[in-house]
Amino acid sequence: MNLITHVLIGIIIQILCFIFLAFPFNFLLTIIIAFLSHFIVDAFSKITYHTPEPHWDDKFWISWNISVRVIGYIAIILFYPYYLGIIFVNLPDIWDWAIVRRIQKRRNKNRKIDYHHNNFFHRIVDKIRKKTLFWLPNWIYEKKAVISEILIDIALIIGIYFLMI
Ligand SMILES: [Zn+2]
């Protein structure tokens, strides 16, 4: 899923942990649940528009990816006090895309990236998806599938609103 969806889920996890748990369990559980949630949420990305490779020639792809990223950054700034959930919910993406992919690009002379390399956290996502969510439709190339992610995000924003009032 995209940055904004993970951020919203990280915020909800931190709010819930801090409502129901005492120190230090609120911190500990926020870290663990936020981190693990990334894999489950990404496994569902099959039902959203999420092409594995970039499509710089497609204006729709560019617009969608810029939008979800910008809205994600705005949410991070607005909900800055929930930084713990936000950081750990995004850790698998930070590790895979910002660190491992960069190292692989530098190492491999042909600039090809082996996404099945053991160092990628997202290999776990593929396993979860194949073993449990194989029955879901595969819409990763369907542009209309942005609607599924938008609906999920709206539901999460409503959830955050009710948790905060
Ligand atoms: Zn991810």
Image: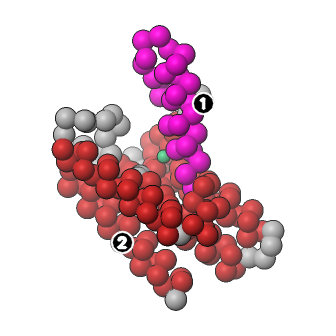
Would you say the magenta stretch is mainly helix, strand or loop? helix
| Residue position for label 2 | 154
Mark 1 or mark 2: name the one nearer the start of the chain.
1
The residue at 31%/40% (across/down) is 51
Residue 142 seen in this snapshot: no
Question: Which residues make up the magenta segment?
Answer: 89-117
x%, y% of residue 85? 61, 62
x%, y% of residue 119? 60, 30
Displayed quadrant of residue 58: top left
Residue at disc 1, secondary structure: loop
| Residue type beneath disc 1 | Asn
Is the residue 12 above or below the residue 105 in the image?
A: below
| Residue position for label 1 | 119
x%, y% of residue 79? 53, 69
| Residue type beneath disc 2 | Ile
Q: Is disc 2 surrounded by few (<14), some (14 to 19) or many (20+) residues within 10 Å?
A: some
Is the residue 99 above or below the residue 75 in the image?
A: above
x%, y% of residue 115? 47, 28
Which mark, residue 29?
Answer: none
Magenta residue check for 54: no
Q: Is mark 1 within 8 Å of ligand 1?
A: no
The residue at 46%/65% (across/down) is 75
Magenta residue check for 100: yes
